[in-house]
Amino acid sequence: MKLHTLKPANGSTHHDKRVGRGPGSGMGGTSTRGHKGAKSRSGYHKKIGFEGGQMPLQRRLPKFGFKNINRVEYKAINLSVLQALAEQKNFDKIGREELIAAGFISSKQLVKILGNGELKAKLAVEANAFSKTAEAAIQAVGGTATKI
């Protein structure tokens, strides 16, 4: 095998259609664009959502709702997850670094501890936010809940 003898497999490539090359080619005249209309003109570009002149869907439906630009998005972590993590890794302190290492959050996410599940281990927990029930449950077993 030599580099100058390499060629694509039979049938894997084909020539581009050469339009507008005279009547003998079978693709002259209108250059396969048909007669008249917007699509036959040069520079034609259909707008996003265009439905042939019919009122587009995004204009037929009413507007509703809004996006709150001040919303703070938290990743929810339950007490049951903290208990399992403490048992598994023998932690007495759980913060962002431990949760990132365990794969529960990414480095950019904020953490909120929620009160679902039972906490038996005495833990020092650091998070961005706590629910009231979670904070009470952590303090009930002798742990501390620290907001970062």
Image: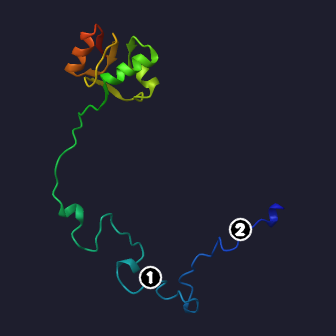
Of the residues under marks 2 and 1, which one precedes in the sequence?
2
Alpha carbons under labels 2 and 1: distance apart: 31 Å
Q: Please tell me which residue is depicted at 55% across the width and 89% down the height of the picture.
A: 26
Name the residue beneath numbered marker 2: 8
Q: Nearer the viewer, residue 32 or 95?
A: 95
Label 2 sits on a secondary structure element that is loop
Residue type at mark 2 is Pro
Q: Residue at x 28, y 20 (%)?
A: 118
**Which residue ends up furthest to the top in the rendered image?**
142
Task: Check disc 2: other Cα within 10 Å, few if <14, some if 14-19, many if 20+.
Answer: few
Q: Report the amino acid beneath label 1.
A: Arg
Work out which residue is located at the far right of the displayed protein and give it.
1
Q: Position of residue 114 (x, y in %)?
A: 26, 24
CB atoms of marks 2 and 1 within 8 Å: no
User: Where does residue 53 sit, x and y in percent of width and height?
Assistant: 25, 74
Q: Residue at x 42, y 76 (%)?
A: 42
Counting the numbered discs, the total is 2
Q: Quadrant of residue 116?
A: top left
Q: Nearer the viewer, mark 2 or mark 1?
A: 2
Helix, strand or loop under label 1? loop
* Residue 116 or residue 62, whichever sits in front: 116
Residue hosting label 1: 33
What colouring does the structure picture have?
rainbow
